[in-house]
Image (spheres, grey):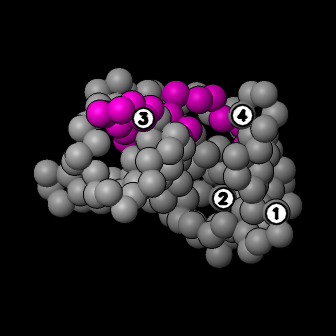
Amino acid sequence: MSQVKSGDTVSIHYTGTLKDGSVFDSSEGREPLEFAVGSGQIIPGLDVALPGMSVGDKKRVEIAPEDAYGPVHEEARQEVPRTDIPSEIELEIGAQLQARNERGEVMALTVVAVAEETVTLDANHALAGKDLIFDIELVSIG
């Protein structure tokens, strides 16, 4: 039976949970996730867990923040004047916005605080700083 090695295209079913057991993502009810192992298409901690697995194998992988979405960077939180945000955008905590950085790249921002004259935006990934647990099943090696 063949085993996964770096460079193989694989398909997996997965459920991602936090330490408190809450599910943040799952392939349940969807097609399996397909990607090339070692290509950087998925978080590093999950990528390194796959080599050696065979089709049908199941595994639980615990991933520290540095091997997932990284630590929370305080400098990625910024307070901006409300007047810098177009008036048609509803400003409520948890709202997702997009902006372009100096290099022209689109960044996802989350509204984390709203005051009378300012809004605090966070460019950290929602899972930054969190330990992640993935239950994975190898569906195919392509």
| Label whose residue precedes the other's in the sequence (3 or 1) | 1
Q: Which mark is residue 28?
A: 1
User: What residue would you read off at disc 2?
Assistant: 4
Cβ–Cβ below 8 Å for labels 3 and 1?
no
Q: Nearer the viewer, residue 54 or 137?
A: 137
**Position above or below: 52 against 80:** below
Report the front residue among 133 and 86. 86
Residue 80 in the figure: left or right of residue 59:
left
Q: CA distance from mark 4 to mark 1?
A: 17 Å
The residue indicated by pointer 3 is: 114
Q: Which residues are magenta?
A: 113-134
Rendered-image quadrant of the C terminus: bottom right
Residue 55 in view: no
Q: Quadrant of residue 45?
A: top right
Q: Which mark is residue 18?
A: 4
Q: x and y percent of residue 37 in the render?
A: 55, 59
Q: CA distance from mark 2 to mark 4?
A: 26 Å
Classify mark 1: helix, strand or loop: loop
Can residue 102 be seen at all in this image of the molecule?
Answer: yes
Per the model, the C-alpha gap separating discs 3 and 4 is 27 Å
Q: 131 or 86: nearer the eye?
A: 86
